[in-house]
Amino acid sequence: MILAVHALAGGVAGTLTSSWPIAIVFSLASHFILDAVPHWHYPVHAEKEKMGGGLRELLLHVRKPKDLARYPIFRDMLSAGLDFFLGLALLSYLAQSFHPGDFWLIVGSGLVGILPDFLTLLYLLFPKNRYLAWFRKIHKKIHSRQRLDDRHLLGISSQAIIVLLIIWLLI
């Protein structure tokens, strides 16, 4: 699933309770439940291109802004950043409009819903960190084996349907 879907699902988990600890557990669970369902992903270039040196390589060797585009990790950070901010903006709008009293709980739950993918991004930035590598293995085991990346219409439309359902639950 894309980050926006995980943020929205985490936000719904926050509406189910007024307890932060329970909201965190529900939000994390929502992430792994959604990842277990076959879905579409946008490409993660750094993973496919064997990192391109990771963050260290990016920071040490980029001299001009136009050089950034050559690094897969930079392209991944741009697409993930856009996905993250769009999802968080939509969740914030819905929380403020329909649940203003629980705004921070819902937005916080949305952030927790994204956390496992954020840890994956950290792994791509710091591939030698053994704790991140361990978490990445667990995350991949839970993740659906069936990928819809080459079936764009089915993959994207299924996520759109999930988003509409989540928005309905939030309002």
Image: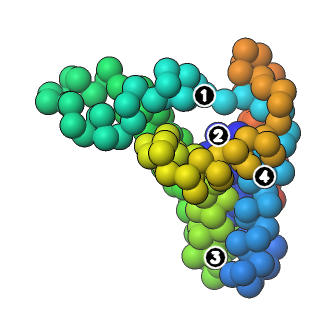
User: What amino acid is at disc 3?
Assistant: Leu
Residue highlighted by disc 2: 2
Callout 1: SS:
loop
Look at the picture and state if 61 lies above or below 138. above
1 and 15: which one is in front?
A: 1
Sequence order check, earlier mark of 2 and 1 = 2
Q: Are marks 4 and 1 in contact (CB under 8 Å)?
A: no
Tell me which colouring the rendered structure shows.
Answer: rainbow
Relative to 52, 57 lies left or right: left
Residue highlighted by disc 4: 32
Look at the picture and state if 87 lies above or below 96. above
Callout 2: SS:
loop
Crowding at mark 3 (Cα within 10 Å: few <14, some 14-19, many 20+) = many
Sequence order check, earlier mark of 2 and 4 = 2
User: What amino acid is at disc 2?
Assistant: Ile
Residue 148, how many percent across, how many down?
77, 23
Residue highlighted by disc 3: 105
Crowding at mark 1 (Cα within 10 Å: few <14, some 14-19, many 20+) = few
Sequence order check, earlier mark of 2 and 3 = 2
Callout 4: SS:
helix
Q: Are marks 2 and 4 in contact (CB under 8 Å)?
A: no
Residue highlighted by disc 1: 42
User: What amino acid is at disc 1?
Assistant: Tyr
Q: Are marks 1 and 3 in contact (CB under 8 Å)?
A: no
